[in-house]
Image: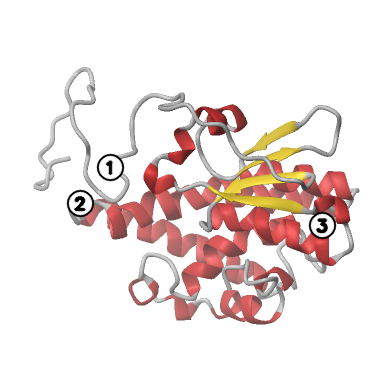
Amino acid sequence: MSETGDYEPPKVWTWDKESGGRFAKINRPVAGPTHDKALPVGKHPMQLYSLGTPNGVKVTVMLEELLARGHSGAEYDAWLINIGEGEQFSSGFVEANPNSKIPALVDHSAETPVRVFESGAILMHLAEKFGEFLPEKAPARTETLSWLFWQMGSAPFLGGGFGHFYAYAPVKLKYPIDRYAMEVKRQLDVLDRHLAENAYMAGPDYTIADMAIWPWYGALVKGLVYDAAEFLQVHDYTNVIRAGRTRFPGANRSGAGAW
């Protein structure tokens, strides 16, 4: 990327060097494993391969909430996947998630283990398996899924967009930082307006939509990611801040929540 903003894209893009930034050494334009290494397997029904990122925290909160409600089938072994060292590109992890992103879950409760990847899919799998945190009928179920998928579509603008250009990129560029800061503040305003009138994201009950949203946006308004709280003036979003302090059980469950 040009530091002066006068970059002219070639007719055909080629990958000829690392782009710089925090994750430059592991980013590449191809999929598949880079090395052979099997994933460890513990003794519990659920095998979680993850890291304490916002996406990883979602599933940990869900499993802890299920255990708190007495579901012994949610017992799990948690295995650290160090994405900074490229462990997500091992043959074992790629088998669990061909997209090489954490988290990945392998459910060993059935005769044939089932892999589940993408955090939203894992939350839905566990919610449906144990009959918790996802209403069975519309409109509550529809509202829950709408907010769950809102997070799936919105958070990349926060993380890969704002977070990258504000905190991780090798050079600071005004246009992308302004562009993504504007979008992140719009998203916070969406949440703030909604939470002014609702106890939880899908209405009166705590659901997987809350578990998906708060590790991202809760960490943001508490200043725990990107060191951007002052820059984004997060104190303006009083309903988001208040909700995180008073309403979300997963915030305090075994230290797993972002709040």
Q: CA distance from mark 3 to mark 1?
A: 38 Å
Mark 1 or 2: in front is 1
Q: Quadrant of residue 39?
A: top right
Q: Secondary structure at mark 3?
A: loop
**Residue nearest the observer in this picture, 87 or 37:** 37
Q: CA distance from mark 1 to mark 2?
A: 10 Å
Sequence-wise, which precedes: disc 3 or disc 1?
A: 1
Location of mark 1 (residue): 24
The amino acid type found where label 3 is placed reads Phe
In this rendering, position of residue 234 left or right of residue 147: left
Residue 36 percent location from the top left of the image? 47, 26
Mark sitting earlier along the chain (1/2): 1
Asked whether the beta carbons under mark 3 and mark 1 sit within 8 Å of each other, the answer is no
N-terminal of the pair, mark 2 or mark 3, is: 3
Q: Assess disc 2: are there few (<14), some (14-19) or many (≥20) residues with their C-alpha within 10 Å of its C-alpha.
A: some
Disc 1 marks which amino acid?
A: Ala
Label 2, label 3: how many angstroms apart (C-alpha)? 41 Å
Q: How many neighbours does mark 1 have within 10 angstroms: few (below 14), some (14-19), or many (20 or more)? A: some
Q: Is residue 239 above or below residue 41?
A: below
Disc 1 is placed on an element classified as loop
Is mark 1 in CB contact (under 8 Å) with mark 2? yes
Residue with the mark numbered 2:
170
**Contact, mark 2 vs mark 3 (Cβ under 8 Å):** no
Q: Residue 12, percent across and down?
A: 22, 18
Considering every residue shown, the one lying at the far top of the view is 12
Residue 104 visible? The answer is yes
Residue 258 in the image: above or below residue 44: below
Q: In the image shown, does 89 or 225 lie closer to the viewer?
A: 89
Left or right of 226 on screen, residue 202:
right
Q: Quadrant of the N terminus?
A: top left
| Residue that mark 3 sits on | 133
- Observer-nearest of 204 and 67: 67
